[in-house]
Amino acid sequence: MSLLLAQGPAPDPGTARAESAPARSLRAAPAAATADTGAVSPFAQSGPRNLIKRLQDTYISSTDDADHSQGHLLHVGTPDAGATKYRSFLQFDVSRLTGANINRAYLRMYNSFVAAPDCGQNSWYGVYRVTEPWNQSTITWANQPAVGEGIGSWFGVGHPNVADCEDQPDRYLPDESKGIVRVDVTDMVKGWTRAGTTTPNYGIRLSGREGAPDAATGVTGYHDFCSMHPTGATQDRACTKSYFTPTLEVEFNAGSTPLITGNEYGPPYAGGYPAAEETLEFLDSANPSVWEASKPYQRWLPDAYHSVEDVTLKGANWKGGTSHKLRPGGSYGSGKVLVTGDGGSGFIGVVPYPALSGYHWAINVKGANEPGDLHGVDLLPDGSVVAAFAGADGVPGKVELYTKEQGQPGDWSGTPVQTIPLNSAHEVVADANGRDVWVLGGLELRKLTYDPATKRFANTTGTSYPLPKNPKGEGAWGHDLTPVYGNPDRFWVGANAGVVQFSKSGAADCHSDTYAKWPTLAAVQEIPNGANRWCTDYGNGLANSRIMLNSVGSDPVSQRVATTCSKDCGLANIGSDGKPTYTTSWIEIAGRTAGKEQYRWSENSKHYKVTWAVAAYN
């Protein structure tokens, strides 16, 4: 289904949209913020579970009419001075991006072979827009389709036996492999996705030099690329990884910060990879009322498809992800990383973003004494990782610290270097200063001090800030802790009792004397300096309209607040026993001035938390 981005009528504020309601169209995204907020834009890669779908690919030969569509290589150019010529064809389905604001688009390929004379010579090949239909099983040299405008690209690595241009596939970080090449196809994708376009999408042709080698340099222009059909490990050392298959990468709707959420629901997807599996999902927030049609634009899980080949890391009970954040790469370089943990399986990983393939760091913490209670994770700037465990089945809650060295690919250890008891620890946030680590427990927010020199916490107690009691005089029980991006003094806190902000400095009174929701003035006055710590002046009263908050956070670009809730909040999934559970199919989004609305892409979805895709600490 095409997703035309003209704005449709908004849902009634405060009213849950029925799953059967007609899908509306996404509006164009807001303009990107002028300041660097850390927020990223939606970035989709073609794949069998994503917004962009791989359709077909093959190569044709001037010397045979065979069907080459299931081969693991795409040949381009000539290996024998023009006696045999090869061209390759690829096609991707981008129809669900119709009308989107396309910022940039690249065709990512893996150059697995060039002839020895081409090493380091930047041999040429062309990328052309195909203008007629074709079929991967019946296309031949004689009936090949015509092409339109083209783009030149040059590449000079890929020979397996010549050291200076060896392709060097990277097992753990595929995007850092030397054989990766990207070609800018932004204009092609814009033409295919423009609303009302008359440019049909028949795909792309790759072709190279098809005659004698260059007389001066000896360059032949012959290339092999990995195809859409990864092969067994014994046939080709590079074309065994799914990341090396031809991939269309598209950044769209700049200024529309994505939402990240784990989903315990494992629906079947067309294309069959896999038939059903829980995933971490990325949702475009430009207009969530289109989610039924668009679904998540990107999905990820720690499996072999995403170059996490150690099956012990994923564990046996992966649930889609309980805690998920984007962070600056820090000790892993200048890029961005996804930091995620999953309570069901015990997986914790630091994954390159936006590649979402392979990992910088990963462990599994699900041992005999871990009852599936991992709730929160974060990455310190020096590469250490902190995890919060809520406790269950008689096992107390705690905070655990792991060093950067413990999660090295191929040699990981899930044994923490330090453990600090904390009742019902649910989420952890590291400060950008690399020293302060904030952990939300059941009845308190605790600040711990990390020492980068010793890679340990300085003490096991830290500083405790009690949560205000609920209107019944009972504990509020905290669930989520996120930075208020753009205000480094503030956190969002989601609890059973509702939503509140916390001031790190406590420098000024930030609680309204007339605030009627949780926390009341009386509740904060019971805490020393409480009215300066627990803040209700954030200017979005609609954000605090539910109890049993699993997650809360704001988008620094649009200032919208997204929440999920469970159990007695009115939006929870219903279990087989007829009672509400700790997951929900609904994500609520409250604008600063507009109403608060509920969105979901499937009535079967089972979300715990939702976070904005902001690659920053605070």
Image (cartoon, rainbow, N blue to C red):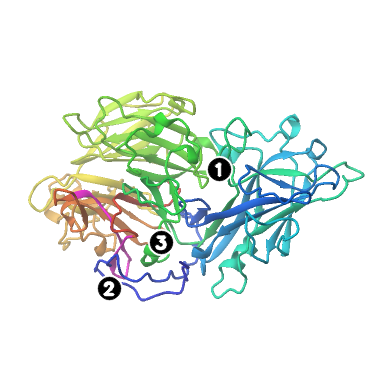
Q: Position of residue 599 (x, y in %)?
A: 31, 62
Which contiguous range is marked in magenta? 581-600
Quadrant, the N terminus: bottom left
Task: Please tell me how crowded label 2 is: few (under 14), some (14-19), or many (20+) other residues with Cα within 10 Å.
Answer: few
Residue 285 is marked as 3
Q: CA distance from mark 1 to mark 3?
A: 26 Å
Q: Nearer the viewer, residue 49 or 357?
A: 49
> Which residue is at a point 58% across and 47% down the rendered structure image?
228
Instruction: Tell me which numbered mark, 3 or 2, is placed earlier along the sequence.
Output: 2
Badge 3 amino acid: Ser
Residue at position x 58%, y 37% in the image? 240
Which residue corresponds to mark 1?
A: 243
Residue 327 visible in the shown view: yes
Q: Earlier in the sequence, mark 1 or mark 3?
A: 1
Mark before the other along the chain sequence, 1 or 2: 2
Q: Position of residue 249 (x, y in %)?
A: 56, 53
Is 592 colored magenta in this rendering? yes
Compare residues 160 and 329 and report the one nearer the observer: 160
Residue type highlighted by circle 2 = Asp
| Foreground residue among 359 and 469 | 359
